[in-house]
Image (cartoon, rainbow, N blue to C red):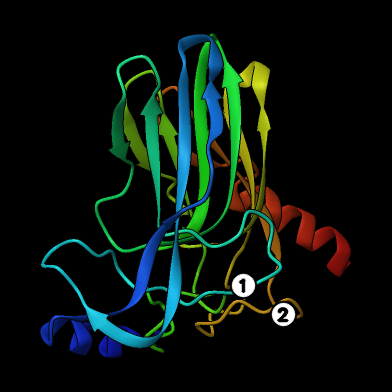
Amino acid sequence: MPNDKASELAKQGLRKQLVSLEGIQWLDTAKSYYFIPVTQLSLEEPEVAAERQYLHSVESYAGNIGGNFNNILVYHYPSGSLKPIFDRRINIFQYQTIAYDSTAVLILMGWTKDTNQDGKLSYDDNTQLFYYSLANDELYEVDMLGFRYISHEFLSPEKELIITVREDTNNDGEFSDEQDRTILLKHSFVDHTTISIVDKLLLDQLQKIIDG
């Protein structure tokens, strides 16, 4: 549902989507922490919404790894405590759990920004990468340094993410598979910083070699 449509319904005290819970999955079983993905159910007709008891509307897509979720609840089983990770509008399309040094991290891919200004959070927007650290109960967003996210992998011994991104090589304001190259970034789980693995000087040297 477009943002303006959802906003208009909210002003009328109506909603077109219902929050729904998508099972329970492990985060850190040794410490009895789990997480519950939050999704949404589309209604055939708008219904009356109790004030402040509905979440944002997102554009739903089928057949993608992980599904489409609008929040994640962290659940501590012994105490029964529940905490939503996000306090803002998001569409999460994929997540993964990783563990290192006796702690757990939940990596999340999705969108909080309507970068193409079409009123939806969808695959046409620039993907953002987040992670929730159970050790300090914090959510972090990975700085893409102005590049467009493509994929990532976790290097456990280094406690770092290696991220493949696309740069706007020809400076036309777009990220093209045919015209713009991919480069590698690394993001540290220790100090939460992102840097390029290969700097521009070396890239230019490599370019001169193939240019002859």
Q: Is residue 41 above or below residue 13?
A: above
Horizontally, residue 175 falls left or right of residue 87, namely right
Element assignment for label 2: loop
Numbered badge on residue 158: none
In the image, what residue type sits under mark 2?
Gln
The quarter holding residue 3 reads bottom left
Horizontally, residue 151 falls left or right of residue 120, namely right
Q: Pointers 1 and 2 in contact (CB under 8 A)?
A: yes
The quarter holding residue 139 reads top left
Residue occupying image coordinates x 66% and y 21%: 156
Which is more N-terminal, label 2 or label 1? 1
In the image, what residue type sits under mark 1?
Thr
Numbered badge on residue 169: 1
Q: Position of residue 15 (x, y in %)?
A: 27, 79
Residue occupying image coordinates x 66% and y 16%: 157
Can you identify the residue that label 2 sits on?
179
Q: CA distance from mark 1 to mark 2?
A: 7 Å
Q: Position of residue 25 (x, y in %)?
A: 56, 34
Horizontally, residue 139 falls left or right of residue 161, namely left
Which residue is at the front of the view, 160 or 202? 160
How crowded pointer 1 is (Cα within 10 Å; few <14, some 14-19, many 20+) is rated as some
Q: Position of residue 94 (x, y in %)?
A: 59, 53
Quarter of the image with the C terminus in it: bottom right
